[in-house]
Amino acid sequence: MKLRYYISIGILWSCLVGQAQIKGIPPHIVPLAADSYEKAKPWVVWYFMHASYSKEGITADLKAMAENNIAGAYFTPIKAKTDPPLFEPAAETLTPEWWEMFRHLVAEAKKYGIQIAMFPNDGFATAGGPWITPETSMQKVVYADTIITVNRGGKVNIRLPQPEKLYNYYEDIQLFAIPVAHQYRRSDEESPKVTSSYGEDVQRLAEKGNKERFATSQPGWIQYAFEEPFPSNALKVERRANNYGADRLKILVSDDGVNFDELTQLKSPRTGWLDWDNGVTHTIPYTTAKYYRFVFDPTNFEPGAEDLDAAKWKPSINIVGITLYEEPRVHQYEGKTGEIWRVSLPTNKEDVHSAYVIDSKETITLNPTAIHGEELKAELPAGTWKILRIGHTTTGHQNETAGAGKGLECDKLNAETVAFQFEQWFGKAYEMVGRELAKDVLTVYHIDSWESSSQNWTKRMPEEFKTRRGYDLTPYLPILAGHIVNSVEKSEAFLHDFRETIAELLQEEGYQTLRKKSDEYGVEFTAEMTAPIMLSDGMEHFGWTDRPMGEFWFRSPSHDKPNDILDAISGGHIYGKNSIMAEAFTQIRMEWDEHPRLLKSLQDRNFALGINSLVYHVYVHNPWMDRKPGMTLDGIGLYFQRDQIWWKPGKAWVDYAIRAQQLLQTGKPVRDIAVFIGEEMPRRSLLPDRLTKTFPGIIGQSRVERTDSLMRNEGWPTQRIASVTTSANMYNPADWVDPLRGYAYDSFNPDVLLHQAKVVDGNVVFADHIAYRLLVVPGQHLLNPTPNHFSLAVLQKFADLVEQGASLLFKEKPTHIHGIATKQDSIAFQKIVDKLFSDMQMADGLQYKSLGKGKVYLGVYHADSFVPLGINEDVIIDNKNNTSISWNHRHFDGGDSYFVANQDSVQREASFSFRTTAPYVYLYDVLEDRLLPVSSVQKDNRTELRISFEPFQSFFVLFSEGQLDLPDWKVAKVETLKGEWDLQLTDVKHESIKQQHPDFWTTSAVDDVRYHSGMGSYSLTFDQPKKIGKQRVTLKLERVESLAEIVLNGREVGVIWTNPLEIDVTDYLTRGKNKLEVRVYNTWGNRFGYESRHEPAEKLIQTIATPKYLKDLQESGLQGDVQLIWYHKK
């Protein structure tokens, strides 16, 4: 055991490392790339509201960005001009006036060294415009049917039903004549009597085409009473808004209206937030009854999640109709066809009336070209026939946040249309600005969060399907209308193949095309999420980008995106992307109290997860030079723009991010575990709460039990944050710090497995990036209801990797092949299953088998570490009892870095044991750019040490081959500065404020002082009789709200904005008289609140923001002791 002693305080290095901003780390400790500083600079989302532009404002915005080390801006015009205009002259998108403003913007951006990213269209989501016709827009499958009786076989004239036709556009796909025993009954054609426990007339809910909603949050029931017993095998809930309760109804049936039996409890599909394009059709057990009672009872409601968005809110039902069907339907087929992003349980074949299943051999395919007007001439045998007309129309979705550039969303599954859309906006910008200027400034093409719903058709779908799946989809098309063809299993298998085809087209026709167009223009391609809106693999598109982007929200649990963040991080990691971006600090309701110290722990937690490139949301262009706060996104987003009171000292916060991001972009991430997301479609990365059933021992008993408790959601507790009430039991990222207790994991998808996985030294490597020591295939979870279904290709690849030396843990044994498979494929599938899982041995409750050079394990993993599998913990914090220190490990040439961040609001000390024995270990204080020594001990091939943290403090632990002698410093003296302080507030007429001890200006009885939003300067003159010599001196504040610029003897020292509220003043302190000035900056909240509740003599607040969610008076200023802390060398 070798012991090294260092102490906990170091010195600031003065050498500059190339162009890197980090000065505190010599290059032999961490070799930073020459361009690391520029790459680490954050960006902003730059909104231009309601056609409001001014050249002066644009220049001022860009100058402010440059001064605060912002690298670039995501240019985003939002909405059309208002009536009357907010700002005149207005510049509507695509007008000559707008292009003049845009050219000025690009020219000024070059002047100030700011890069500009452009979205695919006017507004931020997703990709459309007035140049997109209904034919070239996003398409969806639509259908309608009619029943005819042919008495004698022969030619008949059929009056066809018209499927949905949006924007006067409809094209036929196929027509079918399906033999039926009789005309199936449906409740909206029989007018059952509708009553309820709510005392309201709800008869409308049984009427076809009803648009008037019924909504309630009170438990109760709605009842349909039929004159004759009604046979039912399916039920559709129609709604015009995303609603969880509507798809959780309990169905009771009765023949006398008095005695009821429970038929079933509906179960909601997993849904995203944009889930109102169609209702939900549930397969229910076939039954016949005169009375159907639909009971709303919020007991056992789930707490909500990104993939169950509607359950985040107070339990309610919000519906426009309930329709019962005699004929069976594929369970929740609206999502399974790809029309909407949903994940559902498979249809239970035991529920389906088998006599009503369509036999494709008896179905007659009719020729759509024989349609004349609304009639079809066909030849049919005698009998009763359902004429099913299937076609496609536009989804009708537009780029809703646009101004004058608003139009239909383009077809994302057609490369020609995608390229056309690119040229109409980004290409046009290049043309209008001029290529020479554009290439220097317009450097990024970006797709923001997907907000245009899904699509499930494109004009080449039949050909593409046959090419990719190997069979003709025509006989199975009735399944897209919800019908069960041949069998439940065949129908579900076809729908899986169909969804996979949509997802593949999105990648190859959509994202690959954008990759090619971006390369053609020589620009970077960045993108946010497709999930949970567009049917897709939520990580695969990141393979086409240069930099993935996720999104995290501040104080907005209803809108936060923890799964988005993991999609971007895992997607970036598995596809070899070094820079993982995040749209950062979005919030649903601004409270005007936001400042950097309030945001730091959220920032650090996302750094620990793997984010290493921030994009601040939001910088709103303020066209006025004399109005503050000026233009805003109303109350949405972080107010991060030039008129923010703390904008100038806030540069220190930005610089903290840059230094952290320099290190977080150096080297490669270290992750031991890769978790397979499965082959359900849609699919996305897995949050740790979805893994509790797979390795409960790793996650730990307390978190497993808490997760189970949260999911039970007993009593449906709520929380109220930023005036928004949501479920209190939703997934909270703050509860999942260090989720695998010493291990880090990524999710991986089928695409990267099949095309980029290889075994290197017993580890699986994707895209030549990260080496994973264990692949995990979890069992059933909420986004994969059929975990034992695999494609032949995926199972074969898993077997190959094991034979080549990989370790693979299956929670469940594969049993079924995905999609419609040939007999030969099914035989091959079973052979692989036998190879992997036959003749397994048992140890500690886990089955295992050696195969080739590797091992396969089967079962629930109960051990508390992966040491039995030969994988030691990467880092052990507080003996595996850590819930508040987040961490991130990266390996670079010659060493390793561990970012460690205290998520607690209190001081604490933590013990660490690292899986490394590098000869030298140091702490790097990101805040002060100082390298610190630390005591460590090597034991059992690990390095152990302890770190003391201030509230929300963070460090990098650096392991290096490079040696560095650091002096030992010890506190020699703590001196509280005495004397009379003078407080002066900017832009406020007030008498001189003298204080013997600094105190908040919010304690004043004078309104203009008390409610001051701005800067307040606390100044003190004091004597320093001694020479500093070789000592080191820091200035420490007891309390400051919110940021403080320190000026000593007329020289700016720096900014104190977060704990430990201390700054080095050694080079600024002089012998004799010293003048200290502490310039404190607060937020707009106090003045905003004062003017919204009072009638001041002078209105200072000028903004379009509405003061809806303001807090009470926020403490502002400096309070308590101001101290000099003297250190000397041992």
Image (tube, rainbow, N blue to C red):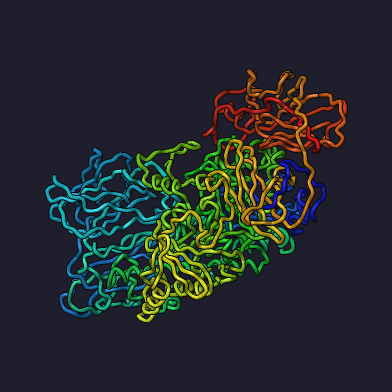
Write down the quadrant of residue 19 in the picture. bottom right
> Seen in the image, is 749 located left or right of residue 434?
left
**Left of 957 or right of it: where is 300?**
left
Look at the image and tell me whether residue 92 can be seen: no
In the rendered image, the residue lying farthest to the front is 1
State the image coordinates of residue 349 (x, y, percent, origin top left): 26, 65
Q: Which residue is drawn at the image coordinates 70% and 59% (left, top)?
A: 433
Which residue shows up at 78% across the image and 51% down it? 964
The answer, for residue 1019, to whether it is visible in the render is yes
Residue 250: give x, y in percent of width and height: 26, 49
Decide: is 548 above or below 1046: below
Residue 1051 in which image quadrant: top right
Residue 901 location, x and y as percent? 61, 45
* Residue at image point 85% right, 33% down: 1028
Between 476 and 815, the residue placed more toward the observer is 815
Q: In the image, is residue 827 above or below residue 854?
A: below
Is 768 situated above or below 17?
below
Locate residue 1130, reporting x and y percent: 80, 38
Count of number-bearing discs: 0
